[in-house]
Each structure stands twice: as structure tokens, then as C-alpha cells.
Image: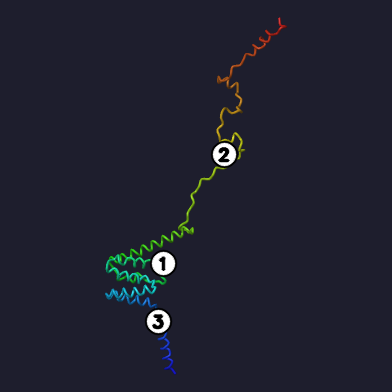
Amino acid sequence: MRIPTVFSLFALVTATFSGAASAQDPRDEMYGKAVHAFFRGDVDHAELLLNDAIAAGSVDPRAYIFRGLCLSRNGIEAGTADFEKAADLEINGARKVVNVGQALQRIQGPVRAEIEKARLNARLAARARSQEMGKLSGGADGLVVPPKNDPAPAPSNLAPNDPFNAGMTKGDAKAMEGKPKNTPPVDDFEAELNGDAPAMDDPAAEPAAAAEEDPFGP
């Protein structure tokens, strides 16, 4: 009874691994074969496999990078469009996480610099879009602070038709013109000592004048 049990377990494990292998995306399989062909030096075959994977709908940025590497045999500019597409997919459109840096470990020289330039431009463009969205949504990055206006002067508590209200507001002081009405009396004695007292008429002269006008006087 133990021998059939062992064979049953072996069959179950084999079926599990077979199912996992068959579940692999055929576009990923074509990409893997293309990478092996590229590093073997069979660039033409690698390009054909990558064309098939991309035509089948692959959104793996590495597929575009290696197709760009194949095209760059005729000059780096020939692969620039694929490098830019790969960078955009890496930042915005990749449906699964892939390690682009690890795939590029064996790629060096000017073509690697062109790939990194495309990746940097894609990151900067994504950051600019994020900041713009923050401004439109009023987020912390795009919070617009309105300018601070000076407070309006307080309204006057005087009547609007008051002739003394011209140019005055509440709390404003206005200088008074002319001499104040309530001037304290001057001490005549002190003023006389200081020489400032006004001249006074002689009181003895007034009866004499009155006597001259008296018609009944002698």
C-alpha cells in the first residue's frame, strides 16, 4: 500500500510544476529566449523574438530596451524610441514589477548612458505631472497662499454730513487752529511785575470828567 502512495505523491508534484510552467506568459518566454540570443551574439534572432513579444502585447519595459539594443547596431539613435518607450512603461505603464537595473548590468558604454538618460527624463516628467496634479487639487505641494491685503481703515463714528468729519476717521487726532477758547485768566499783579500787564486808566480822572458835564454844577 505504501508504493502506490509514493507514486501518487510524485504524480501530484509533477502535475503541479507542469501546471506552473504552462501558466507562464509566452511573451515572457519569448523575451527570455531573446535575451539569451542577444548575449550569444545572435542579434537578428533576438530582434525577431522581441518583435513577436511586443506585437503580442508585451508591456515589459525590458523587451523594448533589448529591442532598442538590437536596433542600436546601426547607431544609438536607432534605438532611442524604444529606450524612451521602455522608460515610460517602467514609470507609468508596467503591470508588474520588473528589475530593469539588473537586466542592464551587462550593458555599458554610450548606449547605457542613452538608456539612463531616457529613464531620468521619464522620472522627471512623472514628478512634474504629480506636482501639477497637486496644484490642481490643492494639495500640500501646490497650496497657493493668497496675498495678504492691508486691513481697511475703520469707519468713522461721526455723522456722514458733519462738516467736521472731513478727512477724519475714528481715532484720528486733528490739530486745532487758532487760539484755544478757554484761556486761563492772567494774573494782573504777576503780569504787571513782568511788564506784561495792559495799561489801565486813572480812576481819579473819571469824576473830573463827569463834573465838567454836569449842567447843574457851579
Instruction: Please identify the quarter of the rendering in which residue 180 is found.
Output: top right
- Name the residue furthest right: 216
Mark 2 or mark 1: which is in front?
A: 1
Q: Quadrant of the N terminus?
A: bottom left
Label 1, on which residue? Answer: 92
Above or below, 210 against 117 in this view is above
Residue at 41% over, 86% down: 15
Mark carried by residue 169: 2
- Local secondary structure at mark 3: helix
Distance between the Cα atoms at labels 3 and 1? 29 Å
- Comparing 40 with 44, the one in front is 44
Mark carried by residue 121: none
Instruction: Please identify the quarter of the rendering in which residue 107 is found.
Output: bottom left
Q: How far from the left and from the top, in percent, is residue 106?
A: 30, 71
Q: Is residue 5 left or right of residue 152?
A: left
Residue at 61% over, 16% down: 200
